[in-house]
């Protein structure tokens, strides 16, 4: 009986070690980034305020350039580059991550 209990506990511990070694979300289509603490602190104190400022400045530049981009037909591209991309980097990305929070593996 003790041998059986020992084997069950050992198999459960080995399963937990293997499960803890994977850094995925359980879904093979997605991967989770695990940034270190210094990356989170730098992101919070330096990168996020700069990205919010870039979003605000980009929105202003987008409004000023709107008549010219409308004539050229590039309103969507200008809005994406000047407003949406910096806003995604500032508000959607997880703290300290390089990309957006969950990245789809192709």
Image (cartoon, helix red, strand yellow):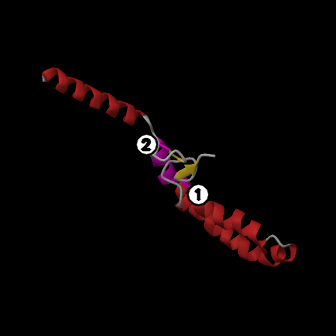
Say which of 86 and 57 sits in front: 86
First reached walking from the N terminus: tag 2 or tag 1: 2
Question: Residue 47: x, y in percent?
Answer: 55, 53
Check the image and report above or below for 40 versus 18: below
Q: Residue at x 58, y 50 (%)?
A: 104
Residue 37, label in figure: 2
Count residues near mark 1 (Cα–Cα under 10 Å), then give few for <14, some for 14-19, many for 20+. Answer: many
Question: Residue 101: x, y in percent?
Answer: 52, 53
Q: Residue at x 77, y 72 (%)?
A: 75
- Give the extent of the magenta segment: 33-47
Q: Is residue 20 magenta?
A: no
Which residue sits furthest right?
Answer: 72
Q: Secondary structure at mark 2?
A: helix
- Residue of label 1: 89
Left or right, 57 with reference to 39: right
Q: Residue at x 43, y 42 (%)?
A: 37
């Amino acid at each position: 009986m003790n041998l059986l209990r020992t084997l069950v506990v050992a198999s459960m511990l080995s399963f937990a070690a293997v499960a803890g070694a994977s850094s995925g979300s359980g879904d093979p289509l997605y991967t989770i980034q695990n940034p270190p603490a210094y990356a989170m602190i730098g992101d919070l104190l330096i990168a996020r305020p700069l990205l919010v400022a870039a979003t605000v400045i980009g929105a202003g530049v987008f409004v000023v350039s709107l008549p010219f981009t409308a004539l050229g037909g590039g309103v969507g591209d200008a809005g994406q580059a000047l407003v949406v991309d910096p806003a995604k980097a500032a508000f959607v990305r997880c703290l300290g991550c390089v990309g957006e929070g969950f990245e789809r593996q192709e």
